[in-house]
Image (cartoon, grey):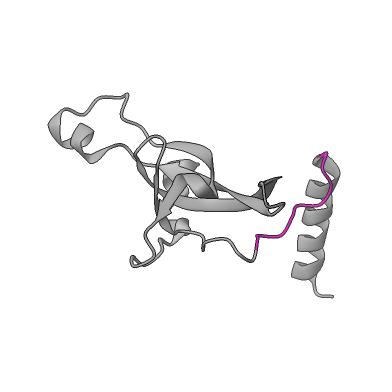
Amino acid sequence: MNYEEELLSEIKDAFDNVLEGGPIPAYPNEALPLGTWVRSNKVDRLGVITDAFYGDLDKDNQKIIIYTIIFFPKTRDITSSYTNNSQCYISNEYEYDITAYLMIKPVDLRKFEGLIL
């Protein structure tokens, strides 16, 4: 094992020890790709998927995927009269509560690093 692999292994172990639920679960195979453009059916906002994980079980005893999404301000808010209340926000949404735009190329999430941090 080289130095980088050993360091990554130690970091992962540290996170595992901190988290109550144990190891960080893998990204669900059935989930939409990271960076996929979506619209929330609840709040009617456009956003981008930043994470996904399994949540509850549905009526058919299937795992429901929950997406972590960064939502952007509504465009009409920005163009008509921008206020500090028009902010991005992050929310968890059930897979049934979003519409995915699969015909648009996913966003490279590294481009948002400066906005989020």
- Position in image of residue 16 (x %, y %): 82, 48
Q: Residue at x 47, y 44 (%)?
A: 97
Q: As rendered, which of 60 and 10 lies closer to the eye?
A: 60
Q: How many marks?
A: 0
* In the displayed structure image, the side of residue 3 where residue 64 appears, left or right: left
Q: As rendered, which of 54 and 110 lies closer to the eye?
A: 54
Q: As rendered, which of 24 and 8 lies closer to the eye?
A: 24
**Magenta extent:** 20-28
- Position in image of residue 115 (x %, y %): 42, 43
* In the displayed structure image, the side of residue 107 where residue 49 appears, left or right: right
* In the displayed structure image, the side of residue 116 where residue 53 appears, left or right: right
Residue lying at the far left of the rendered structure: 80
Does 24 lie within the magenta span?
yes
Q: Residue at x 38, y 34 (%)?
A: 43
- Position in image of residue 69 (x %, y %): 49, 45
Residue lying at the far front of the rendered structure: 60
Q: Quadrant of residue 29?
A: bottom right
Main SS, magenta residues: loop
Q: Residue at x 21, y 29 (%)?
A: 82
Quadrant where the image shows the N terminus: bottom right
**As drawn, 5 above or below 62:** below
Does 112 lie within the magenta span?
no
- Position in image of residue 56 (x %, y %): 69, 44
Q: Residue at x 80, y 74 (%)?
A: 2
